[in-house]
Amino acid sequence: MTRRRAPRPTALAQQETEAGFQSAVMELATLAGWLVWHDADSRKNAPGLPDLIMVKPPRAVFAELKTASGRLRADQRRWLDALGACPGVETYLWRPSDWPAIERTLLATEPLDLAG
């Protein structure tokens, strides 16, 4: 059986588009056994809903993805804060430079201790 490697960030990660970054995160999550949801047309959603919803019981992750220079809008912060206040729900704001943390998060079997 051939094992696929997780995608790796390139030296140009700082210039990566959000779509390319999102594709890499979704690929890693899928390879790691997560169910991954992304709405291809977010115009029909409530403003601020995170880009990705990923579930791998007993974990549920909501991730907002931004480019290196992308800004988090107030409605996006409101969603992340509200979801983060729910027991057992993990929320993240990820940029391409966060790739090592993204790998740790999605390859872990249990939620990471973010306080430690």
Image (cartoon, rainbow, N blue to C red):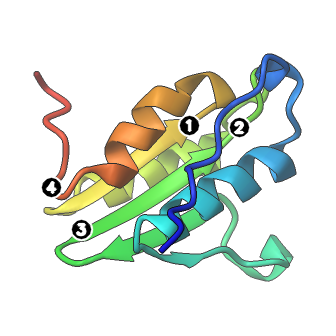
Q: Closer to us: mark 3 or mark 2?
A: 3
Which of the two discs, 1 and 2, labels the residue nearer the N terminus? Answer: 2
Q: Residue at position x 34%, y 45% from top?
A: 105
Which of the two discs, 1 and 4, labels the residue nearer the N terminus? Answer: 1
Q: Position of residue 80 (x, y in %)?
A: 44, 50
Which of the two discs, 3 and 1, labels the residue nearer the N terminus? Answer: 3
Q: Marks 1 and 2: CB-CB under 8 Å?
A: yes
Position above or below: 73 against 11: below
User: What residue does disc 1 label?
Assistant: 94
Which of the two discs, 2 and 4, labels the residue nearer the N terminus? Answer: 2
User: What residue does disc 2 label?
Assistant: 66
Circle 4 sits in a helix, a strand or a loop, which is it? loop
Alpha-carbon neighbours of circle 1 within 10 Å: few (<14), some, or many (≥20)? some
Q: Marks 1 and 4: CB-CB under 8 Å?
A: no
Q: Marks 4 and 3: CB-CB under 8 Å?
A: yes
Q: Closer to us: mark 1 or mark 4?
A: 4
User: What residue does disc 4 label?
Assistant: 110
Q: Residue at position x 79%, y 73% from top?
A: 42
Circle 3 sits in a helix, a strand or a loop, which is it? strand
Name the amino acid, label 2. Answer: Lys
Comparing 85 with 7, the one in front is 7
Q: Marks 2 and 4: CB-CB under 8 Å?
A: no
Alpha-carbon neighbours of circle 3 within 10 Å: few (<14), some, or many (≥20)? some
Disc 2 and disc 4: Cα gap in Å? 25 Å
User: What residue does disc 3 label?
Assistant: 59
